[in-house]
Image (cartoon, rainbow, N blue to C red):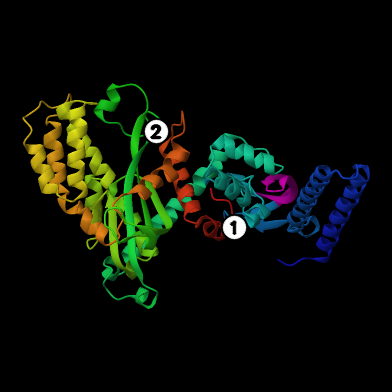
Amino acid sequence: METKEGLKRALMQETEAGVRKLLEHLQKLPEGDLKGLEQRVMETIFEIGRGWMQSVLSEAAPEEQAPGERVGSCGHQQQLVGYRPKQVLTLLGKLTFNRAYYQCVVAEECAQEGCTHGEAPADQLWGVQGRRTTAGVQQAVSYLCASSTLEEAAATLCRLLPVQMSARQTLNLLQPLGEALQQQEDEQVRALWDQASQARTTSQPSAADQQESIERLYIELDGVFARLRRGSVPMEEQERKRQGDVYREVKVAAVFEATRGPERSGLAPGVFVDQAGPKHYVARRGKAEDFGKLLYTLAVTNGLQRAHQLVALGDGAAWIWRLVAEHFPGAVQIVDLWHAREHVWKVARAVFGPHTAEASAWAAHACSLLVEGKIEDLVAAIVVFPPIPPEPGTSRSVPDIERDYFISNAGRMRYPAFRAQGMHVGSGIAEAGCKTVVSTRAKRTGMRWTPEGLDAVLAVRTAVLNDTYDAFCEQHALLVA
């Protein structure tokens, strides 16, 4: 952007006036008042900055250079009707600048074509047409929303910068930016899917073969339920019958590279357990099919094609293993040991009753079989129980349900073999991911969401956690609406 001589003089005058004002204030400050000095300097910086911005914005369309007529964006002839002020909220505070305003000459013709009759070219130039906030403010407050409530984010921004903003204004800025992040993720998925199927397996040669290989890549999956406003999503019959809000699952996954760490395995003496590297997350409310494509794209981005071995960890949820089988067919599949232990305890409590010595004794023995990978022996210990009635609302008894659970997941529970290779056998990182990505932000006391609000927050939060937020902001110099 070229700086004209008139603009240079205006900027220098703004600076000199601000410095003189600062010097006047400094003379009144008590010696040693560091806090007062700091505040005065900050106020001066913001004041000078606002003056600079107003000068630059106004100089872009000086009154003496504005043409009397022009062709508007609607294609109609427009004439200058005067200069009108425009107020914009910036990171330096609110500022106002004058810009030329034009209206269409033939109003009747414009009305028939749905034209708005008037526009300011400077608004289009600076990306504030129909908007009163800069991209910098939107990106700053959205960043705060990644870890804070709307109210907290607004309060923090107002405390740190000379701006005023409400929680509602914060949501109005956050939501379109989150939607843009989701759109970017979806575009990355489409771009990957448009490529030839050479990227569908890690064994096929590609450009990734020239990069440094990864010994072992992990994918850990889990789900967590978030509270949505009643009526904001289609409800099932049982939900319509009862009062209150509804809950929907947010699927979360973490992808990370692992290296051999310093910790020795407690289950395999002499073996060192993998140590997790930087984690990259994906979280989305919706169908497992769509989530699977997002996860696959994240895995490719973080070295799937360079990995010698892929390990997928999750609980026994059917959608997890269907997803893994479809997108990561060569992965070593492991059921989280701690989730599997919970299923053991379900059997113990159902057969012997909760908080009984018999239940504890049987569960201890069954868990030892589980840890040793003796799933067939564990199943045999379950089938010997005499039949018990199903729990209310179910058609099958707990032992029958859990027997099938262990049978169907037996191959994913060979824990000694997994530990002998130093692999993780617990999906603690995925569970922590649910807490880190979703619960600590979206499941605070009393929180309930619209689908659009929740989706936007999840998109911004994962971008911040994955260190991709700044790159996204660099690509968007204008406010996202």
Looking at marks 2 and 1 on the same chain, the residue that comes earlier in the sequence is marked by: 2
Element at label 1? loop
Query: Can residue 467 be seen from the camera position used here?
Result: yes
Q: Nearer the viewer, residue 128 or 312?
A: 312
Q: Which residue is mark 2?
A: 228
Q: Which residue is mark 1?
A: 477
Q: Which amino acid type is shown beneath numbered disc 1?
A: Ala
Q: Residue furthest front?
A: 269
Quarter of the picture holding the N terminus = bottom right
Q: Nearer the viewer, residue 21 or 232?
A: 21
Task: Specify whether residue 436 is painted magenta.
Answer: no
Residue for point 74% across, 46% down: 96
Q: Is residue 269 left or right of residue 262?
A: left
Magenta part of the chain: 80-104
What percent of the width, then of the height, locates residue 330?
23, 63
Query: Can residue 189 be seen from the camera position used here?
Result: no
Residue for point 52% across, 43% down: 147
Q: Report the predominant secondary structure element of the magenta stretch.
A: strand
What percent of the width, then of the height, locates residue 46?
76, 49
The image quadrant that residue 383 belongs to is top left
Q: Is residue 480 left or right of residue 243?
A: right
